[in-house]
Amino acid sequence: RKKKEHDAVTVLHPTATVHSAKLRVDGIHKYLDHNSFRFDHSFDEDSSTEQVYQYTAQPLVSYVCGGRGVRATVFAYGQTGSGKTHTMSGIQKMVADDIFSFLSDNVLEDDSCCSCDNTTISIAIFEIYG
C-alpha cells in the first residue's frame, strides 16, 4: 500500500464502516469522516461465494420449498467491478442445486410439502446496469 492511502470501507462483521476524506471549513486541513452501518451479516474482500451463499440465499431454499407458495429475492448492490456478477453466478448455481436436491429428497407423503411431483419452479435473474 502506498503512503497516505486508506481503504474506503472497512468490514468487521456485522458492521461496515465507510471512510470519507473531507476538507475542513478552512479549506486547508483534511480529515476522515467515518459512518458505520450494521447489517445482519457483512462480508469483506476475503469472503468466498460459498460463505455469501451460506448466510444469504441458502436459508431461503427451505423457506421457498416449505409448501406455502412463497417467493424470495436475493439482491446484490455495489460498485462496478466489485464482483457482484461473479458472486451471484455462483449463488445461482448453488440455489438451483439445493432446490432440486431438496425436492428430490422429499417423498410425497401429503400435499403440505414440496416435492418434484407437485412443484413448479420459476426463477428470474436480472442484471441491471445504470
Image (cartoon, rainbow, N blue to C red):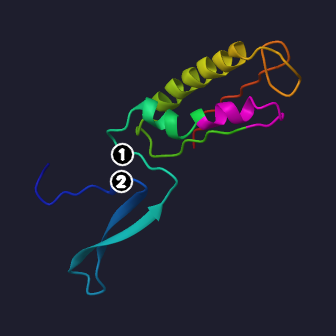
Q: Is residue 117 magenta?
A: no
**Circles 2 and 1: CB atoms closer than 8 Å:** yes
**Residue at the spot 10% in from the left edge and 56% down from the top edge:** 3
Q: Which residue lies furthest to the bottom in this view?
A: 26
Q: Is residue 62 magenta?
A: yes
What is the x, y in percent for residue 67? 82, 30
What is the x, y in percent for residue 98? 61, 21
Q: Name the residue under label 1.
A: 44
Question: Which amino acid lies under the numbered mark 2 shown in the image of this protein?
Answer: Val
For residue 98, the mark is none
Packing grade of label 2 (10 A; few <14, some 14-19, many >=20) is some
Q: Residue furthest front?
A: 109
**Element marked by disc 1:** loop
| Front one among 111 and 2 | 111
Of labels 2 and 1, earlier in sequence is 2
Q: Distance between the residues labelled 2 and 1?
A: 6 Å
Question: Which amino acid lies under the numbered mark 1 shown in the image of this protein?
Answer: Asp
What is the x, y in percent for residue 81? 41, 37
The answer to whether 96 is drawn above or below residue 129 in the figure is: above
**Residue at the spot 32% in from the left edge and 56% down from the top edge:** 10
| Segment tinted magenta in the rendering | 59-71
Q: Name the residue under label 2.
A: 11
